[in-house]
Image (tube, rainbow, N blue to C red):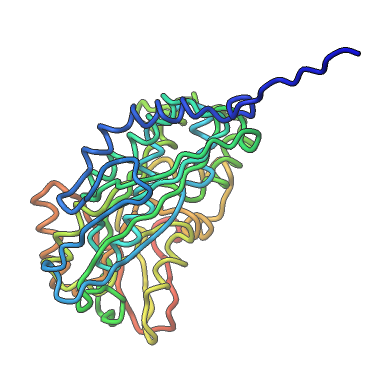
């Protein structure tokens, strides 16, 4: 009778390479450490990230947290094999969200799930996370890279993260101070950011049959893929000094839901908002998407940021001073609307709505 020899299986045989994981950590270590603030305790590789809150900085500190991912924008990264901007998208979606409540981002953790762990690809993504954390002033104090063989296709992954910030309880921005007569001060986006990409992909790849390499005069030398992968803008560095100096009545991070859904979230009872679409120049990519997909303009402003990524609701007097402050730093801003009496609804008029 023949002897039945059984192979000694390893974790690698099942599709999980521990050595590749260790090598990816080695590749990202310096980038991660570069984000550390004085409050960070310990080192990379612990079971948990440690952060000693500087409680003396606050009278009554409140922690503010936010979590998000990048969504189907990842499909473009896979198509174009370009992964250096996705990390910033993950950070921006989180830190911008906690910023609107007046919080200074303190630390961030990421979760990266891959089909087959490719250390260089992982390092590229996480270095993007680290660079965005550094620009936002928050520390990347930990994360998880999960190799999930058979769950994702080779070369594909998903990324999510969460940010924690702090604000004095008395300085939390809730929208309660918003009143008729306030104005909306818009700060430009860097492009499409990270929302609406299911519609973007439907228009560009299903309807038009593009592959991302196309060039259009309106995009100023960028390919379509480069334009669509432009990372989400980080707003903490611009907005935190304004939060510190002025009485900000409300803030809006313009994400999924566009103008109609996001602005209404912070409006107190008895108020509404009128937005003037003539107040800023709509970036070319939104005009192209609307034309290619024959999308109604109301739907465009309901899905996309249309060139405005952050909105501050302030008094008319403060708006003038804030604009002067921003202009002195080379930052553009626009008075894009006003608060009126209403039932927490948003009306966008002017511009394309007059055509």
Residue 173 falls left or right of residue 153: left
Q: Quadrant of the N terminus?
A: top right
Where residue 264 appears, as percent x and y from the top left, is 42, 73
Farthest residue to the right: give it: 1
Q: Position of residue 213 (x, y in %)?
A: 49, 24
- Quick one: 248 or 315, which is closer to the camera? 248
Q: Residue furthest front?
A: 1
Front in this rendered view, residue 1 or 31: 1
| Nearer the observer, 114 or 47 | 47
In the current view of this chain or complex, which residue is farthest to the top? 2
User: Is residue 69 toward the left or the right of residue 35 in the image?
Assistant: right
Residue 256: where, in percent of width, then height? Answer: 47, 57
Where is residue 252? Give x, y as percent.
34, 64
Q: Nearer the viewer, residue 7 or 177?
A: 7
Residue 181: image quadrant is: bottom left
In this picture, is 8 found above or below 69?
above
265 w.r.t. 40: above or below: below
Q: Residue at x 18, y 49 (%)?
A: 37
Which residue is depicted at the point 41% across and 50% down?
A: 161
């Amino acid at each position: 009778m023949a002897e039945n020899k059984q192979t000694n299986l390893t974790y690698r045989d099942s599709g999980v390479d521990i050595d590749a994981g260790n090598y990816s950590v080695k590749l990202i270590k310096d980038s991660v450490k570069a984000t550390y603030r004085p409050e960070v305790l310990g080192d990379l590789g612990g079971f948990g990230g440690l952060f000693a809150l500087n409680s003396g900085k606050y009278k009554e500190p409140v922690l503010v947290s936010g979590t998000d991912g990048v969504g189907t924008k990842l499909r473009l990264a896979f198509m174009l094999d370009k992964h250096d901007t996705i990390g910033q998208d993950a950070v921006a979606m989180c830190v911008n969200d906690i910023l609107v409540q007046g919080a200074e981002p303190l630390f961030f953790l990421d979760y990266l799930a891959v089909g087959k762990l490719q250390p260089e690809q992982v390092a590229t993504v996480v270095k993007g996370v680290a660079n965005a954390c550094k620009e936002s002033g928050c520390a990347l104090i930990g994360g998880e890279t999960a190799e999930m063989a058979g769950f994702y296709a080779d070369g594909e992954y998903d990324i999510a993260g969460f940010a924690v910030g702090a604000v004095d309880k008395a300085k939390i921005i809730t929208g309660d101070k918003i009143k008729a007569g306030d104005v909306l001060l818009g700060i430009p986006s860097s492009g499409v950011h990270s929302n609406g990409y299911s519609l973007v992909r439907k228009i560009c790849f299903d309807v038009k049959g593009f592959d991302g390499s196309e060039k259009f005069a309106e995009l100023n030398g960028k390919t379509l893929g480069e334009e669509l992968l432009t990372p989400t803008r980080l707003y903490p560095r611009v907005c935190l000094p304004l939060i510190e100096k002025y009485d900000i009545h409300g803030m809006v991070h313009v994400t999924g839901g566009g103008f109609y859904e996001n602005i209404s979230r912070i409006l107190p009872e008895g108020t509404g908002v009128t937005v003037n679409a003539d107040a800023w120049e709509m970036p070319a990519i939104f005009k192209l998407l609307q034309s290619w997909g024959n999308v109604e303009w109301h739907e465009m402003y309901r899905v996309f940021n249309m060139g405005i990524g952050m909105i501050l609701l302030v008094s008319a007097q403060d708006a003038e001073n804030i604009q002067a402050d921003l202009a002195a730093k080379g930052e553009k801003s626009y008075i894009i609307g006003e608060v009126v009496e209403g039932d927490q609804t948003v009306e966008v008029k002017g511009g394309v709505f007059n055509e």
